Image: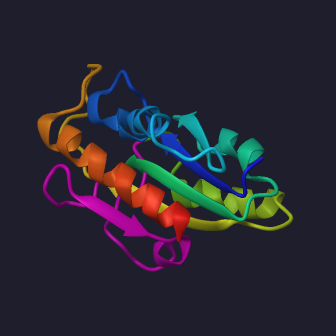
């Protein structure tokens, strides 16, 4: 097991909400073998099984922050504990809530960095919108650079 995990969340049947999963699919073509990749689907709570004994976790997900579609956000859990206008998850439980539950269940939390991409469309559909598809290579590049840091 690698010490660093890149975990992509999202629902590929809901347009841009699938950005995290699409990023993992793309990263599988370029990631070094000492880096683990996983698709988290839509349940941040289920990700706990991947987190034990990790030093670093890099998350990729759709994030509504009010900027132009395709905007890439980078933040840490510490920044989530401050007032913000980011709707940090489009799923049933928010990412901050899931991370609080992870803290209760894990002996030690990994260092976490989150990359969010502002969605344009989260209706039924399997493709990414043009601005989110254009952001996909960059969010993958940023996640790999963060993993190598």
Q: Which of 37/42 is in front?
A: 37
Q: Total label count?
A: 0
Q: Residue at x 68, y 39 (%)?
A: 46
Q: Residue at x 50, y 71 (%)?
A: 76
Q: Residue at x 26, y 19 (%)?
A: 125
Q: Magenta segment, principal secondary structure?
A: loop
User: What's drawn in magenta, residue-wise?
Assistant: 63-90
Q: Which of 16/2 is in front?
A: 2
Residue 85 belongs to magenta span: yes
Q: What is the quadrant of residue 132 in the picture?
A: top left
Q: Residue 92, image x and y in percent?
A: 50, 40
Q: What is the quadrant of residue 106 in the picture?
A: bottom right
Q: Which of 102/109 is in front?
A: 109
Q: Is residue 60 left or right of residue 103?
A: left
Instruction: Decide: is 72 above or below 16.
Output: below
Q: Is residue 104 left or right of residue 77?
A: right
């Amino acid at each position: 097991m690698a010490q660093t995990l890149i975990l992509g969340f999202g629902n590929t049947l809901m347009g841009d909400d699938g950005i995290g999963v699409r990023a993992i699919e793309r990263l599988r073509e370029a990631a070094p073998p000492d880096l683990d990749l996983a698709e988290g689907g839509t349940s941040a709570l289920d990700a706990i099984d991947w987190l034990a004994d990790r030093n670093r976790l890099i998350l990729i997900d759709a994030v509504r922050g009010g900027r132009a579609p395709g905007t890439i956000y980078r933040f840490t859990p510490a920044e989530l504990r401050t007032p913000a206008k980011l709707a940090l998850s489009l799923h049933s439980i928010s990412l901050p809530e899931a991370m609080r539950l992870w803290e209760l269940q894990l002996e030690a939390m990994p260092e976490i960095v989150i990359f969010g991409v502002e969605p344009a469309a989260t209706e039924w559909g399997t493709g990414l919108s043009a601005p989110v598809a254009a952001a996909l290579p960059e969010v993958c590049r940023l996640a790999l650079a963060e993993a190598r840091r």
